[in-house]
Image (cartoon, rainbow, N blue to C red):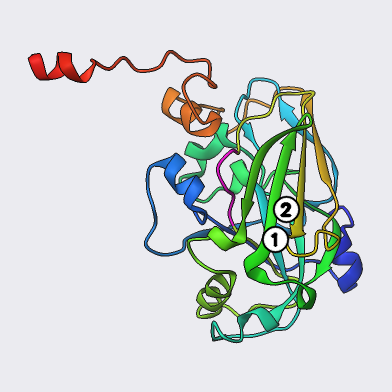
Amino acid sequence: MSATVVSQTLDHSVGTIVAVHLSYPSRAAQRGRTPKETSCFLKAASRLTGPGEVVRPEGTELLVFEAEIALVIGKAGRHISEEDAWSHVGWVIAGNDMGLLDFRAADKGSNVRSKSGDGMTPVGPQLIDATKVDPATLRIKATVDGKVVQDDSSSTLLFSFSHFIADLSLFMTLEPGDIILTGTPAGSSVLQPGQTVTVEVFSETDPSLTSGELTTTVVAGPALADIGSAPAADDKQRIDEWGSPEEAGLEPEFELPPNCASAS
């Protein structure tokens, strides 16, 4: 594992990384569904990295980025109440829940191949002291090649950070160094080799409290060996990950105008 500011601060390796699925209304609207409760998956903590490069192998196409506010647990706890939950957060940091989604089907829901590859969980570059920020006024912003593509606030979350923590602690003891990736707003998409994505988290009330810029560059790599499941993607998945048929390079579905439909 590459040394990160998290492990350097803790003086030990990161434990568990929990990634939350849909959590922002903007993303839920983009996906066409709003969850009634939180859901999540695990990412391999051994694959955590800092700013740098991520490889897209030849023969794959759906390397995605997802800018996220990452919470680093500072105090252990089990059965934590929502009222007490924020006191268990030591730091906030920028995270990028990247993935090679050509392998989503092969994972059958686990996300092991698609989300836990080398370089797929960059965090950094600076930690923000959780005691100095209001969890409801954190901003997450991402740029691709300098253009803003994601920009949202924790004030809009479907479920609060405290809810995430209380919910998870029903099932597991949260330990210092565990990381919760709290979901991404609308605007995440697919990256091509040569492109650079930059993520920043900062306080809306005091922008000087910032994670700094977490920058990752995509580089082209050789094809994967012909072992196990091959990369695969269909048009529905392409549209989901790019954000629209047009962005995915597909023809939009043809729909009859309302007056024609009623006349038929």
Is 55 placed above or below 246 here? below
Q: Provide residue 146's location: percent of width, then percent of height.
A: 79, 31
**Residue at position x 64%, y 20% in the image:** 59
- The local secondary structure at tag 2 comes to strand
Is 181 placed above or below 103 here? below
Q: Is residue 155 left or right of residue 176?
A: left
Which quadrant of the structure image shows residue 58? top right
Question: Is the magenta region chiefly helix, strand or loop?
Answer: loop
Which quadrant of the structure image shows residue 218? top right
- 3D distance between C-alphas at marks 1 and 2: 5 Å
- Identify the mark nearer the N-term, 1 or 2: 1
Q: Nearer the viewer, residue 187 or 216?
A: 187
Type of amino acid at the residue the image marks with label 2:
Gly
Asked if disc 1 and disc 2 are in contact, CB closer than 8 Å, the reply is: yes
Q: Is residue 19 left or right of residue 191?
A: left
- Residue 70: assigned label: 1
Say which quadrant the N terminus sits in. Answer: bottom right
- Residue 95: assigned label: 2
Q: Nearer the viewer, residue 261 or 3?
A: 261
**Residue at position x 70%, y 60% in the image:** 70
Please give the range of residues in magenta.
183-187
Q: Residues within 10 Å of mark 2 (few under 14, many from 20)?
A: many
Queried whether the magenta region covers residue 23, the answer comes back as no
Type of amino acid at the residue the image marks with label 1:
Ala
Say which quadrant the C terminus sits in. Answer: top left
